[in-house]
Image: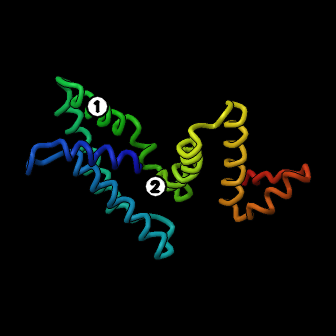
Amino acid sequence: MLRALRELQAVTDAAAGDQWCWAAQAAEALTAMQALVAGAIRHGRDAVDPAALAAQIHLFRSAVLAGASQTAARSGALMKKHHALARRLLDRQDDYLRFTRDWQVPPDNNGCERDIRTTKLKQKVSGCLRTLTGARQFCAIRSYLSTAGKHDLSFFNALVMLTENRPWIPSAA
């Protein structure tokens, strides 16, 4: 969702001055849904207020439908990108809003971006990962450690288990 919010902000920035922009409404609705979920979790509830969630989903869907309609002409490269964004938000609405139903799904991709940040930094500092094999090994180790950390296993213990030929594997449940 974080990427979608960035793209919606870019559409809003490209819009003319004080004119209403579908992307701003869609972004506000997404942010409001994120706040609803965070509030429900903070107060120990099992679900988000259905009426409040339905209202935000309606605002989101209305905005995205308006965006798809406004950009349907696809007269330029920028409008084509805006139309593609609106269509993607419509077509994959369930995916983008999954965090409202399944609280195990984070509302943003910060964790994913954080996991690859070290790889990008290593590329930037050293110029590259020398071989494809080395890059794959580096990514496999980073993925293993990231998953272990998300399951409250220390990196050190995960690496010790790995070197003792008894790798940690998360439970399926």
Q: Nearer the viewer, residue 139 or 83?
A: 139
> Which structural element holds mark 2?
loop
* Residue 57: image location, x then y, percent: 32, 51
What secondary structure is found at the residue carrying circle 1? helix
Asked whether, in this view, residue 100 is left or right of residue 69, the answer is right
Q: Tell me if 31 is positioned left or right of 142 in this view.
A: left
Quadrant housing residue 32: bottom left
Q: Residue at x 51, y 74 (%)?
A: 44
Gap in Å between the C-alphas at discs 2 and 1? Answer: 23 Å
Asked whether residue 141 is in view, the answer is: yes
Residue 80 is situated, as x and y percent measured from the top left of the image, at 25, 27
Residue corresponding to mark 2: 107
Q: Position of residue 68 (x, y in %)?
A: 24, 33
Quarter occupied by the C terminus: bottom right
Residue 29, quarter of picture: bottom left
The residue at which mark 1 appears reads as 81
Q: How is the image coloured?
A: rainbow
Location of residue 156 with respect to 91 vertically, above or below: below
